[in-house]
Amino acid sequence: MYVCVCRAVTESEVHDCIAGGARTARQVRDATGAGGDCASCVRKICAILKRSEDLVTSA
Ligand code: FES
């Protein structure tokens, strides 16, 4: 499923990026390009970041 339609970035690509150390929407954008166009996906990227943070902190 695409998170960023403009740049054709999938949710799994964002997860890979987070696994690779990205902690902010800006880092995800720099690594994948997601959010670099219309920015309507930034909110979704933030939600994914938040969810992965919750997983880490609850582990
Ligand atoms: S949907 Fe990601 S920049 Fe437009």
Image (cartoon, helix red, strand yellow):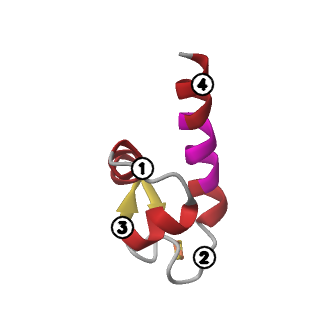
Q: Which of the two discs, 3 and 4, labels the residue nearer the N terminus?
A: 3
Numbered range of the magenta stretch: 46-52
- Mark 1 and mark 2 lie on one chain; the one further toward the N terminus is 1
Image position of 52 with respect to 34: above or below: above
Q: Residue at x 45, y 77 (%)?
A: 6
Mark sitting on residue 57: 4
Crowding at label 3, few (<14), some or many (≥20) Cα neighbours within 10 Å? some
Q: Residue at x 63, y 72 (%)?
A: 40
Amino acid at dot 3: Ala
Dot 4: element:
helix
The quarter of the picture where residue 8 lies is bottom left
Where is residue 44 shown, x and y percent of the image? 61, 55
Residue 41 lies, in percent from the top left, at: 59, 66
The kind of residue tagged 1 is: Glu
Residue 4 showing in the rendered view:
no
The residue at the point 37 percent across, 63 percent down is: 9
Q: Is residue 29 left or right of residue 9?
A: right
Q: Which residue is mark 2?
A: 39
Position of 44 with respect to 18 (left or right) is right
Label 4 and label 2: CA atoms lie apart by 28 Å
Q: Compare residues 49 and 6 and report the one nearer the observer.
A: 49
Q: Which residue is mark 1?
A: 11
Structural distance between the alpha carbons of marks 3 and 4: 24 Å
Quarter occupied by residue 7: bottom left
Mark 1–mark 2 distance (CA, rounded to whole Å) = 15 Å
Q: Is mark 2 within 8 Å of ligand 1?
A: yes
Question: Which residue sits furthest top?
Answer: 59
